[in-house]
């Protein structure tokens, strides 16, 4: 295995509750009141929709997709959802420091070192809101690819806190059969004083609609027994994933760069994330250096070499 490369679950597409829009010549993040499932193909018009997006909308009979039936790939909660405090280089989109509030891994001139992590509120490096919680959730949608996943990335406290709690509870109450439970992602909304009473949306994880907790656990036990009978080793899969994630100091993929820069680390007076209004947001990312940023370079590259306008996702 190549050292220094995090081996992560195969990704078939993305799940988001927002998109990027053009305003005054700038690409800015905008939150939605629905899910969008996209492929991993991006054009000048944005991310190309995945066929499952239209399929699920038709199945629900609603033009707005507010729930997605899913299953987890792993029984271990921390393998399905990786959430840490993260500080990215604003120019390259690469992680500079990642921690859990206890310890952190940080790039220094001497290499990557493990240091105490006091959390963003008490960290000198995180001053100015440079360090944010960053969560990655991998889920399975449909049965076409047993090991392929769709990824939901978020910097929202509401989504990260809720997903972490739900996964932990379902893992415990099912007797460590998290990967066999019929679950669904559900979009929820609320209004707070922090959001100036404007609606904010976050992602929750529940037992699939139409099923009870008792029925879901009974189904999970039957699924687990059936999988063991044909030789599927869930414990070995979890361990292989654990080793893969631990093969590098940071979980990072090149395809994340655009998403990090455009959705999570734009200018302070333009960025709106879960639970925040424009007036609440502080500057994020590391200080800008002189010269064009990677985001600006990517923009120029797209203009110079525009992709096909009618590119469609493969079925």
Image: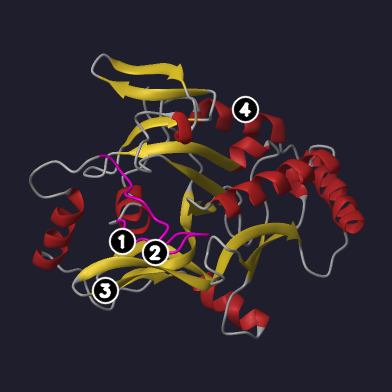
Is 216 situated above or below 83? Answer: below
Give the quadrant of residue 74. Answer: top right
Q: CA distance from mark 3 to mark 2?
A: 17 Å
Along the polypeptide, which appears first: circle 3 or circle 1? 3
Q: Residues within 10 Å of mark 2 (few under 14, many from 20)?
A: few
Along the polypeptide, which appears first: circle 3 or circle 4? 3
Q: CA distance from mark 3 to mark 1?
A: 15 Å
The percent coordinates of residue 49 (x first, y second) are 43, 72
- Quickly name the residue at label 1: 269
- Quickly name the residue at label 3: 22
**Circles 1 and 2: CB distance less than 8 Å?**
yes
Q: Main secondary structure of the magenta part?
A: loop
**Circles 3 and 2: CB distance less than 8 Å?**
no
Q: CA distance from mark 3 to mark 4?
A: 43 Å
Q: Looking at the image, is mark 3 or mark 1 nearer the viewer? A: 1
Asked whether 231 falls inside the magenta stretch, the response is: no
Question: Which residue is located at x 33 percent, y 52 percent?
Answer: 265
Can residue 162 be seen here?
A: yes
Q: CA distance from mark 2 to mark 4?
A: 42 Å
Q: CA distance from mark 1 to mark 2?
A: 6 Å
- Quickly name the residue at label 4: 239
Question: Which residue is located at x 63 percent, y 47 percent?
Answer: 161
Tell me which segment is drawn in magenta: 268-286
Q: Secondary structure at mark 1?
A: loop
């Amino acid at each position: 295995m190549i050292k220094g490369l995090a081996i992560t679950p195969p990704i078939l597409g993305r799940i988001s509750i927002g998109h990027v829009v053009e305003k005054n010549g700038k690409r800015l993040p905008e939150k939605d009141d629905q899910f969008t499932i996209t492929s991993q193909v991006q054009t000048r018009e944005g991310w190309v929709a995945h066929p499952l997006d239209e399929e699920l909308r038709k199945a629900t009979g609603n033009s707005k997709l507010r729930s997605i039936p899913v299953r987890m790939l792993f029984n271990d909660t921390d393998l399905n959802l990786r959430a840490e405090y993260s500080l990215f280089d604003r120019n390259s989109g690469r992680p500079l420091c990642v921690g859990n509030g206890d310890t952190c891994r940080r790039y220094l001139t001497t290499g990557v070192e493990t240091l105490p992590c006091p959390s963003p509120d008490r960290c000198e490096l995180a001053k100015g809101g440079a360090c944010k919680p960053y969560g990655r959730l991998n889920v399975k949608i449909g049965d076409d690819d047993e090991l392929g996943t769709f990824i939901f990335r978020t910097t929202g406290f509401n989504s990260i806190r809720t997903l972490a709690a739900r996964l932990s509870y379902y893992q415990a109450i099912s007797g460590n059969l998290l990967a066999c439970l019929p679950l669904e992602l559900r979009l929820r909304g609320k209004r707070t004083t922090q959001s100036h009473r404007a609606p904010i949306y976050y992602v929750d994880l529940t037992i699939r609609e139409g099923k009870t907790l008792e029925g879901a656990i009974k189904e999970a036990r039957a699924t687990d027994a059936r999988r063991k009978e044909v030789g599927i080793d869930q414990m070995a899969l979890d361990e292989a994933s654990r080793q893969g994630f631990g093969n590098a100091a940071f979980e990072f993929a090149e395809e994340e760069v655009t998403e990090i820069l455009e959705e999570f680390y734009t200018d302070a007076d333009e960025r709106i994330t879960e639970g925040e209004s424009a007036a609440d947001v502080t500057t994020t990312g590391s200080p800008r250096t002189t010269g064009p940023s990677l985001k600006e370079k990517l923009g120029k590259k797209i203009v110079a070499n525009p992709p096909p306008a009618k590119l469609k996702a493969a079925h």
